[in-house]
């Protein structure tokens, strides 16, 4: 549908808790499309949550592929199991120019609905597990900087 502005750190919407999606209708499908369009327009991003485009609904998109062929769209995502933990570097489209060291689970099991309203489950590890945690945190009004052990300003080159 459209590329939306990604809200930046300091915007109060990013700190609010999103509402559960009760019905997958055209409005929800349009939001999902806007998330996809916005993610793909912002190079370097691997995920986006609806609050980042000003929509307080529990919808996320993630794509770890280089050719934009691996899009995951998840509605009402929920982490049902966390396994292990490890430190890694994270960034966020809502806080450009910075990265932080964050401790996240090594593996997660995530459930939610796809765009057809079907229950779906992911057994994720590595970067996908971290992306799920990061984007689901956005739905709860939690920003990665709040969990970071250390923050770094990226060099501008």
Image: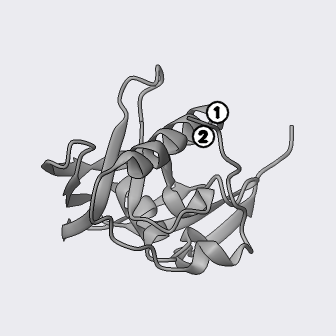
The furthest residue to the top: 67
Relative placement, left or right, of 117 versus 41 is left
Residue at image position (71%, 50%) is 5
- Tag of residue 29: none
User: In this figure, what is the number of numbered marks?
Assistant: 2
The x, y position of residue 150, in whole percent, is 63, 72
- Residue under label 1, please give it: 41
Is any part of residue 46 visible from this angle?
no
Relative placement, left or right, of 2 versus 156 is left
**Number of other residues with Cα within 10 Å of mark 1, as a class: few under 14, some 14 to 19, many 20 or more:** few
Instruction: Please state which of residues 122 and 53 is positioned toward the viewer in this rendering.
Output: 53
Callout 1–callout 2 Cβ contact below 8 Å: yes
- Residue under label 2, please give it: 38
Measured along the vertical axis of the image, is residue 77 above or below residue 156? below
**Residue 116, picture quadrant:** top left
Measured along the vertical axis of the image, is residue 62 above or below residue 153? above
Residue at image position (33%, 50%) is 25
Question: What distance separates the C-alpha of mark 1 from that of mark 2?
Answer: 5 Å
The x, y position of residue 76, in whole percent, is 29, 63
Measured along the vertical axis of the image, is residue 102 above or below residue 6? below
């Amino acid at each position: 549908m459209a590329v939306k502005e990604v809200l930046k750190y300091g915007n109060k919407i990013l700190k609010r808790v999103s509402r559960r999606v009760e019905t997958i209708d055209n409005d929800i499908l349009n939001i999902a499309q806007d998330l996809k369009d916005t993610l793909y327009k912002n190079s370097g991003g691997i995920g986006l949550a609806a609050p980042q485009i000003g929509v307080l609904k529990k919808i996320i998109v993630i794509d770890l592929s280089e050719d934009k062929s691996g899009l995951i769209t998840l509605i009402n995502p929920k982490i049902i199991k966390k396994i292990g933990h490890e430190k890694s570097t994270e960034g966020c489209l809502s806080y450009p120019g910075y990265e932080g060291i964050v401790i996240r689970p090594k593996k997660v099991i995530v459930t939610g609905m796809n765009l057809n309203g079907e229950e779906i489950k992911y057994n994720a590890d590595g970067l996908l597990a971290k992306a799920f945690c990061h984007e689901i945190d956005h739905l709860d009004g939690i920003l990665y900087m709040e969990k970071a052990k250390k923050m770094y300003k990226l060099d501008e080159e």
